[in-house]
Amino acid sequence: MSRPRLLDAFSCEGGAAVGYERAGFDVVGVDIEPRFAKRYPFEFHAADAIEFIRLHGHEFDAIHASPPCQGYSVATLGTPGAREKHPRLIEPVREALIATGKPYVIENVVGARAHLHDPLTLCGSMFNLTATDDDGTTLRLERHRLFESNIMLMSPGQCAHDKSIPVGGVYGGGRSNRWEAKNVRRGGYTPAKHVREELMGIDWMTLHGLSQSLPPVYTEHIGAQLIEAL
């Protein structure tokens, strides 16, 4: 019996894709950046994601889309004009997805909540995502992300932020010195790349890919529910 096929739109370097593959999908990625083909672990197409959904979305059993988050991110709030430089694509993406008639998921950051329909929130604490820093300190990953779908999505539980364990960030602009991150309060603490990889459950990406990615365990959880709904 063949596996269902999932289109991974705005795929970047494939964090969401690996989770869906583990859940049981054959995954195909599409992103406008052809350089991502070097890291993407499955079939990849360099193309405009929305146009690809319009032309080929009906050929898949389900579709995941992670439109660019910069236009919605709280990280851009303090920079004049920053949000205007980045497209807000959730609405046109949703329109294209609905037209396919397929089960879909739209993922984005917490700042996009007002633009998403009844989204599910996932957090690293729901999956006990932790890593050991170079000095032996245990770090935890939060990385809240929102998921809209036209099927009912269930949460694996509630956020359980253990304040006794420091957070390790996986993004650009953080501080590599934990004391500075705590006391200077600019950007948060971002550990070495290999520690970020352990936090995310990813070992094939560039730093840019890690900063933009989802932990695969998030989409493995969602993918199991998508397959059940097919």
Image (spheres, rainbow, N blue to C red):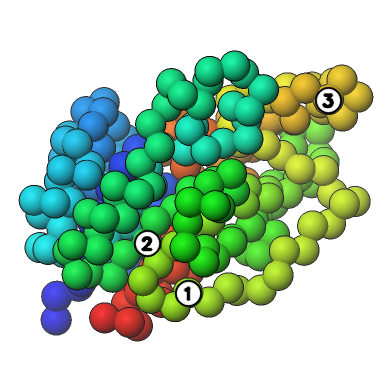
Q: Position of residue 139 (x, y in %)?
A: 76, 45
Give the Cα distance between marks 2 and 3.
34 Å
Disc on the earlier residue, 3 or 1 = 1
Helix, strand or loop status at disc 1:
loop
Instruction: Find out whether the residues at labels 2 and 3 contact each other: C-beta distance under 8 Å.
Output: no
Amino acid at circle 3: Arg
Amino acid at circle 1: Leu
Disc on the earlier residue, 2 or 1 = 2
Q: Nearer the viewer, residue 71 or 37?
A: 71
Instruction: Find out whether the residues at labels 2 and 1 contact each other: C-beta distance under 8 Å.
Output: yes
Amino acid at circle 2: Val
Q: Which residue is mark 1?
A: 153
Q: Which residue is mark 3?
A: 185
Name above or below for residue 181 compared with residue 20. Answer: above
Q: Is residue 159 left or right of residue 145?
A: right
Question: Does residue 157 appear in this view?
Answer: yes
Q: Is residue 43 left or right of residue 64?
A: left
Q: Which residue is mark 2?
A: 105
Q: Residue at x 44, y 68 (%)?
A: 222
Helix, strand or loop status at disc 3:
loop
Q: Nearer the viewer, residue 196 or 180?
A: 180
- The quarter holding residue 96 reads bottom left
Q: Position of residue 199 (x, y in %)?
A: 62, 46
Disc on the earlier residue, 2 or 3 = 2
Q: Nearer the viewer, residue 29 or 198?
A: 29
Give the Cα distance between marks 2 and 1.
10 Å
Q: Residue at x 53, y 20 (%)?
A: 82
Check the image and name the residue furthest to the top: 80
Which quadrant is home to the C terminus?
Answer: bottom left
Q: Residue at x 67, y 37 (%)?
A: 169
Which quadrant is home to the N terminus?
Answer: bottom left
